Amino acid sequence: MGQHELSRRQALGAAAAAAFMPSLAGAAAPARWPVTEGANTPKICLGGGRDETSMRRVKQLGVDYLIGNAPWPIAWQEPAIRAELERCKAAGITLDNLMITGFNNAVYGRPGRDEEIDRVNQSIRAAGKAGLPVIEYNFYAHRATEGYFEETGRAGLGHTGFDYEKIKDLPPLPGEGAHSLEEMWKNITYFLKAVIPVAQQAGVRLALHPNDPPAPISRGSGQIMGSVAGWKKLIEIVNSPANGITFDCGVTREMGEDPVEVCRYFASRDRINHMHFRNVRVAKPYERYTEVSIDEGQVDMFAVMKELVRHKYSHTIYPEHSRALDYDREVAKATGGLRGYPGGGGYAGTTFCVAYTRAMLQAAIASV
């Protein structure tokens, strides 16, 4: 090969490399593998028992965070919370979030609500001193679970359907009564103005779970968290990161809204204090939908995850409402069958959800 020919080939090669370089220059540096959760990323969590066996199963899935229901009535006590945190820590798990209940008089605006709110505040202060970062709560006038039923998905996979037609004419329950939307907003406003300053001082974030299902009227009562407009109104009542929501991308789609856009709205304002990661297929917003496998619904799960990572959301993300697999059904026969939502699954279904969620998280961290 002559010197002229060699020089021409070298020149062509240099030109090709130069043409390719801009695309490389604009690309993000490859992430170090494996991609793991960090200080400014979502933390995958699971709910469930905090006994040794349950926590071992959680750790086997690579999950390091737990949430759950508080095992004590209000008012919570610091030593009890601290003991629960330490028990989880000994298993290599962080207990991040406990659900608080027991203040129905405050929910319904009845006599005795001030005493209940005082016990809630005592619980918040105790949580702050013990080091529990998040407390989740509900403010349902009524939860329309009577509208749930089991449906069948691919190869017999369990799905959970909801149909408002089944429950729209049900009367109010004696212990609940019927409450207008205006009344419920007055009650939550009274509650938030009493508890959020305490939470803020204690260093604890509150996360109000949305109405799920988001029925328009539930046994005669309006639902304050049954619309995205309601979610937005809630965080303005007391403007504080302590006054946040549990963002559920599945519920968001159930209401006919765009989960990515809604996630952006609340994440950019630092008002997502916990997150539920699941998928649905909606026939009629608010009224007729099906909870399906996390990989096959109408929610763009990867886009939602990227939005969380983009805004450096650093709290827990719960891949909840697993679907019923035959394996889970067989295992559960010895204990009378699967419990929970119709069509809901067990440990095998949870494993699928965790694996899918971790893949979404790793891909989002590597690409954002």
Image (cartoon, helix red, strand yellow):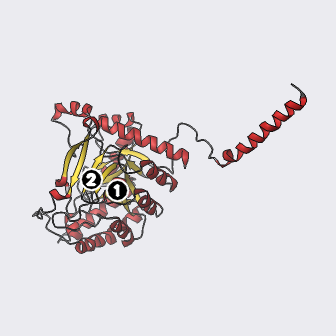
Residue most toward the right?
Answer: 3
Side of 307 where 12 appears, left or right: right
Q: Secondary structure at mark 2?
A: strand
Q: Position of residue 256 (x, y in %)?
A: 33, 60
Residue at numbered disc 1: 253
Looking at the image, residue 161 lies above or below residue 5:
below
**Residue 64: quadrant of the picture:** top left
Asked if the residue at tag 2 contacts the one at tag 1, i.e. Cβ–Cβ closer than 8 Å, the answer is yes
Q: Position of residue 314 (x, y in %)?
A: 46, 52
Q: Secondary structure at mark 1?
A: helix
Residue at numbered disc 2: 289
Q: Position of residue 367 (x, y in %)?
A: 55, 46
Examine the rendering and report whether any part of residue 260 can be seen: yes
**Residue 157: quadrant of the picture:** top left
Residue in the image at 45% along x and 50% along y: 305
Residue in the image at 70% along x and 47% along y: 22
Residue most toward the top?
Answer: 1
**Towards the viewer: 328 or 54:** 328
